[in-house]
Image (cartoon, helix red, strand yellow):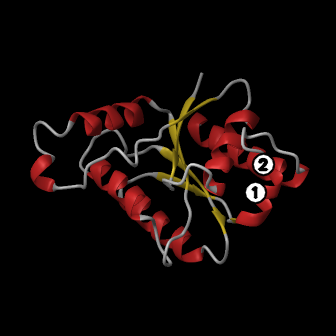
């Protein structure tokens, strides 16, 4: 069964982007497993001096989970026209690892406004890291909060269809 590692790009527990991941987890086809990784708040600041033969244990665990996944899903807010620092830090820890290149990465986004800067920035970063990026248009944060309950149940058919389509694209990318 294909395994997707989902990374919420926000440290905020009740973020709209976390809701998107919960909804994706519930809407995933029976042939796809989505595991949520809440590692962002536990990773130390990236330091190349600590990324040699023995990086921190939490980094090794994170890299292992990324390596074991068939794909990665990231749902991130846009902060100050860019990627949140905690998410960028996590990606920095993956740059020199062998686990990430070639992975399909689905980008979801719930934003209060225009998220094109985030989409451009994160797509550039992930492409530089040799990921196979599947970028979806951002969804409006207020709509996501109305459409998805705290446990990930989706009560809006259009939001459910958007997420289902994104998962279908991810499934196709994993088969290739």
Residue in the image at 35% along x and 37% along y: 62
How many residues crowd mark 2 within 10 Å: few (<14), some (14–19), many (20+)?
Answer: many
Asked which quadrant contains residue 92, the reply is: bottom left
Relative to 81, say whether 84 is above or below. above
User: Which x, y percent locates residue 127?
Assistant: 42, 60
Say left or right for 141 vs 36: right
Query: Could you tell me if residue 165 is visible in this image?
Result: yes
Q: Name which residue lies at 53% across and 55% down.
A: 133
Badge 1 vs badge 2, beta-carbon distance below 8 Å: yes
**Circle 2 residue:** 148
Which residue is label 1 attached to? 145
**Residue 140 visible in image:** no
Marks counted in the figure total 2
Give coordinates of residue 5: x percent, y percent: 51, 37
Front residue of 56/102: it is 56
Q: Quadrant of the N terminus?
A: top right
Element on which disc 1 rests: helix
Q: What element does badge 2 sit on?
A: loop
Residue in view at x 44 percent, y 64 percent: 84
Residue 40: % across, % down: 40, 48
In the rendered image of this protein, does residue 49 appear above or below residue 103? Answer: below
In the picture, the quarter occupied by the C terminus is: top right
Query: Residue 119, percent across and down?
Result: 55, 68
Question: What distance separates the C-alpha of mark 1 from that of mark 2?
Answer: 6 Å
Q: Measuring 59% from the left and 75% from the top, which residue is drawn there? A: 116
């Amino acid at each position: 069964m294909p395994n997707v590692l989902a990374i919420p790009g926000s440290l905020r527990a009740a973020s709209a982007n976390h809701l998107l991941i919960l909804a994706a987890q519930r809407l995933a086809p029976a042939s796809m497993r989505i595991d949520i990784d809440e590692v962002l708040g536990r990773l130390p600041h990236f330091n190349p001096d600590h990324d040699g033969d023995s990086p921190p244990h939490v980094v090794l665990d994170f890299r292992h989970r990324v390596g074991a996944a068939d794909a990665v899903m990231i749902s991130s807010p846009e902060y100050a026209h860019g990627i949140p620092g905690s998410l960028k830090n996590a990606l920095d820890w993956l740059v020199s690892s062998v686990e990430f290149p070639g992975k399909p990465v689905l980008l979801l986004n719930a934003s209060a406004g225009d998220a094109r800067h985030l989409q451009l920035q994160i797509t550039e970063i992930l492409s530089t890291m040799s990921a196979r990026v599947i970028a979806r248009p951002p969804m409006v944060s207020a709509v996501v909060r109305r459409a998805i309950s705290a446990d990930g149940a989706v009560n809006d058919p259009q939001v459910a269809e958007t997420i289902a389509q994104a998962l279908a694209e991810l499934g196709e990318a994993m088969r290739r």
